[in-house]
Image (tube, rainbow, N blue to C red):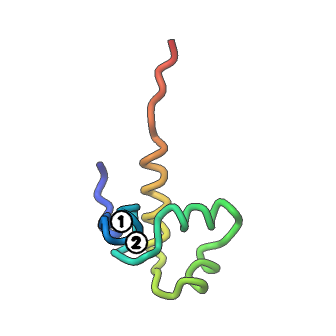
Amino acid sequence: MLEFDRITFDPNIMQGQACIRGMRITASLIINLIAHGKTTSDILDEYPSLENEDITQALEYGAWLARDEVHVG
């Protein structure tokens, strides 16, 4: 696994989902917001506790998860 120093996992926060720096903001929320047209600036305005690096790392984490290899027949 790559080093994701801003992605945290705590069973007591958001049921152990990948969160940003121990906050109740999940990586999947950030990825979903971007997928639906929000810009980094929009997200930072809406969630002032986030930093640009948090958004970048959430996207990197999502890309890392999606790199699954599929072996066809």
Could you say whether the residue bearing mark 1 is in a helix, strand or loop?
strand
Regarding mark 2 in the picture, which secondary structure is present there?
strand
- The answer to whether residue 36 is above or below residue 51 is above
Please state if 57 lies on the left or on the right of 44 as rendered. Answer: left
- Tell me what residue is drawn at x 51 percent, y 61 percent: 28
Nearer the observer, 23 or 12: 12
Judge whether 6 appears above or below 4 on screen: below
In the image, what residue type sits under mark 1?
Ile
The reply, left or right, for residue 48 in relation to residue 15 is right
Query: How many numbered discs?
Result: 2
**10 Å crowding of disc 1: few (<14), some (14-19), many (20+):** some
Of the image marks 1 and 2, the number of the one nearer the N terminus: 1
Taking 25 as reference, is 38 left or right? right
Please say if 5 is above or below 49: above
Kind of residue sitting beneath label 2: Ile
Location of residue 7 by image quarter:
bottom left
Q: Nearer the viewer, residue 57 or 28?
A: 28
| Residue 8 position in % (x across, y down) | 32, 66
Q: Which residue is mark 1?
A: 7
Percent x, y of residue 51: 45, 80
Residue 4 drawn at (x, y percent): 32, 61
Residue closest to the far top: 73
Separation of disc 1 and disc 2 at Cα? Answer: 5 Å
Q: Residue at x 60, y 62 (%)?
A: 32
Q: Residue at x 71, y 66 (%)?
A: 37
Which one is nearer the viewer's eye here, 28 or 50?
28
Residue pointed to by mark 2: 20
